[in-house]
Amino acid sequence: MKFPVHTSPYGGLPNNVTRVMGEVLLALVPGIIALVYYFGWGVLINIVIAVITALAAEAGILRLRKRPVKPSLTDLSATVTAVLLAIALPPLLPWWMTILGVLFAIVMVKHLYGGLGYNPFNPAMAAYVLLLVSFPVAMTQWLPPQMLNEHPLTFTQTLAAIFGGGLPHDLTWDAITSATPLDAMREQLKMNKTISEIAQNPMWGDFGARGWEWVGNWFLLGGLFLLWRRIITWHIPFAMIAGLLLSSGLFWLFDAESMPFPGFHLFSGGMILGAFFIATDPVTASTTPKGRLIYGFLIGVTVFIIRSWGGYPDAVAFAVLLMNMAAPTIDYYTQPRVFGFRGKDNA
Amino acid sequence: MITHKPGSWDFHGGIHRPDKKSVSAGKFLGKVPLPEILVLPLQQHIGAMAEAIVEVGERVLKGQTIARVSEYIGAPIHAPTSGTVVCIEERPVPHPSGLSAPCIVLQTDGKDEWGELPEPLPYFDDMDPSLLRERIRWAGIVGLGGAAFPTSVKVNHGPDRPIQTLVINGAECEPYITCDDLLMREQADRVVEGIKVLLYVVDADECLIGIEDNKPEAIAAMREAVAESGLKDVQVVQVPTRYPMGGEKQLIKVLTGKEVPSHGIPSEIGVICVNVATAAAVTDAVMAGRPLLSRLVTVTGEGVNNPGNLEVPFGVFMSDVIAQAGGYSERAYKLILGGPMMGFSLGDDELPVTKGSNCLLVASRAEAPDPDKAMPCIRCGKCMDACPAQLLPQQLYWYAKARDFDKTQEYNLFDCIECGCCSWVCPSHIPLVQYYRFAKTETWAMEKEKRQAEDARRRHEARVERLERLERERKARLRQKKEALEKKTAAGGANPRKAAVEAAMKRVAEKKARQAQAEKNTEESS
Ligand code: SF4
Ligand code: SF4
């Protein structure tokens, strides 16, 4: 009898890229629901715009590069990029900015470097930074969380706002938007207010900014799910949070009146999302165990530095991109000890 | 020195996958009847190929040596039964590349008549270990766990490497395979006898028998046999079920806490590791004077009707073995020699069972689907987390693909044990091990070429130098002669003979010059 041959191992392989990306998307769901709850329909509309754009761009590029389209679309990697970017955007960002960002992420950052697996920079974060630098005003106009929002928009009103239909008659942009908590903290510190004065503002909650802290918690839940499913390892999130807490804690101990409490850093802005979903992007992160610790830690410290003294209120995107550049070098110098080699530690 | 808390260490990585042992575990289907023709490849082991020492047409008896080796690393081959040598020629052999190789083809005569055997050595512990090593070598014993490395070489560790621990490998970590399990369950005494001999031969302080905890019957049987034997410092250690626990380096690490050095062998750290079936074969050779003629083979998978284990004489075609296990079911899709992690698929079943054939896995399409198209590496690091050699498979893959074989060496390609864990976990379904095998082969080829080029260069340089030296010597001789001559001339004043010759030459030259002048003059005047 004759048989077909191929090389070992034999058997249905347990992992595949679609499953990995699919579980990442699943893990994002609780956080997204929280975002929609606190900040309205805009979040969801942004996601839809971004995903459609990403899939179209991916298909177009693959056709141009004469690569098979179907396997790459179904691997869900473009979808993950789109969703990650979309949830980092202000809920009422004009539709074309979202599209521009996604196109930049997929076409320039991902495919011009060779496509999935070859891009040195995290596409979602690169696109976020591009938008932030190009449209600083639009990119920092957030909505206040639902409990502080006096003029919540309905679904159709949100749709109209995003697609250029303007706002309902009685409202102005200034009336409905507010700065992000990180921005607010920054501005007020600049005005030489002390932390205890700033903390009087109703925007602050139990351990971070109201609304934001709960979004953070739900993303944390998703992150733990990824850990449990072994999609990510503990190294990067742990080290990144440790880096942020250590550096911010150190300064807070010395000067609690002009340096915010470390918990504020953790639960305001994109820290949790960044630690579990963005910095862990395998393609652009460090891959060795020790390297992951260093990589994560440095991101955490960089976030703190940029937030405290840099030109932008939130810093996760910048910090991640910076460390993306360092990842190959970190990997090179942190190769694990190979079995049977003595003299080095047993990591 | 005795290992404290053997089995309390761990190795990095590895994988869990359904072990599928129950398909064939504990089932013995008997001995495969002798077919009319046996095909015995001359290379059934690692090392030098054996040379046939029988002639075509010669009658041979069971147990007779029909091929021997002169090199140190190698193993002889014996006739599994009596019969006639019909030819010695290239036949297809079980090899990943589907190669043909020299084989002795034996027509069996059905008499199964034994030839003369060496005497049993029940009092082996009065003998010189080197004689026992000789016996093991004569018996053609090789590692029966699949690697087929000559056992006589393994147990010859040399006086400068004292052995502390004899590790007996009963882990059998590959899914599906149960032949070692069966052997331990049913013939634990035979294994323990072999351990006794081996302990004496390598002069080890202790023996640790590692068995995965998915084989409780085997563990119990072995414990009982050890207890009955009265052997001290022999311990059955239950180890966790995790692939590749049965890898030599991994099992040694888990049992003793010691790591075999990179590029090294276990005896360097005072350990020798032998498979359970190999130990049983040693018993036969020493206690009964019988060479290795057959082995237990697991026949399993959804593609056979009656999976189980069979005693198979070497040289029997796999098709016959599978027929004995109830034949193919309609789900048979692939034939894999060895386990699903490290085995290789065969295109054909008309191939002989050899010393290294531990398992015939007839897989259904569900058990061994065709490989998917590989996606790009997403650098997720899952391969690294699974690699028991603690390598960076993603980097190795990257450089192997780019054919940068210096870099693959830098990333310790040759510490890769080809266990397949990385390929198994890779979400992009990249056939990583295939790339490493390719890179290894290429590196060997390149090194061979380099060596040859180096040899050629050296030969060339040597030749040039020899010629130059000869030339120098010739010149030196000439100079000496000349100097001697000059000295003589100087010493004896004018040499009369030389002077005469010179005078004559001068006269001739003058004459020629005059003639030329005369001719010139005539020409000018005319
Ligand atoms: S498991 Fe596969 S995709 Fe992941 S890093 Fe290794 S080779 Fe790349
Ligand atoms: S095949 Fe080699 S590289 Fe892959 S896991 Fe096994 S030892 Fe590591």
Image: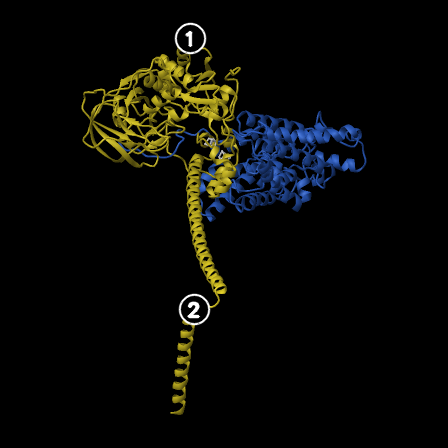
The tag earlier along the polypeptide, 2 or 1, is 1
Q: Is residue B60 above or below residue A84?
A: above
Quarter that holds the N terminus of chain A = top left
Query: Which element carries disc 1, helix, strand or loop?
Result: loop
Residue B68, percent across and down? 30, 29
Query: Total label count?
Result: 2
Residue denoted by label 1: B230
Query: Which element carries disc 2, helix, strand or loop?
Result: helix
**How was this image coloured?**
by chain
Q: Which mark is residue B496?
A: 2
Residue B21, percent across and down? 38, 19
Q: Chain of mark 1?
A: B
Q: According to the colouring, which chain is yellow?
A: B
Q: Residues within 10 Å of mark 2 (few under 14, many from 20)?
A: few
Q: Residue furthest bottom?
A: B526
Residue lying at 52% horizontally and 17% vertically, measured from the top left: B8
Residue lying at 58% horizontally and 40% vertically, measured from the top left: A328
Quarter that holds the C terminus of chain A = top right
Amino acid marked by disc 1: Gly
Residue B269, percent across and down? 50, 24
Q: Chain of mark 2?
A: B
> Does residue B172 appear in this view?
no
Amino acid marked by disc 2: Pro
Q: Is residue B358 above or below residue A299?
A: above
Q: Are marks 2 and 1 on the same chain?
A: yes
Q: According to the colouring, which chain is blue?
A: A
Q: Is residue A114 left or right of residue B343?
A: right
Q: Is residue B505 above or below residue B179?
A: below
The one of B434 and A87 positioned closer to us in this rendering? B434
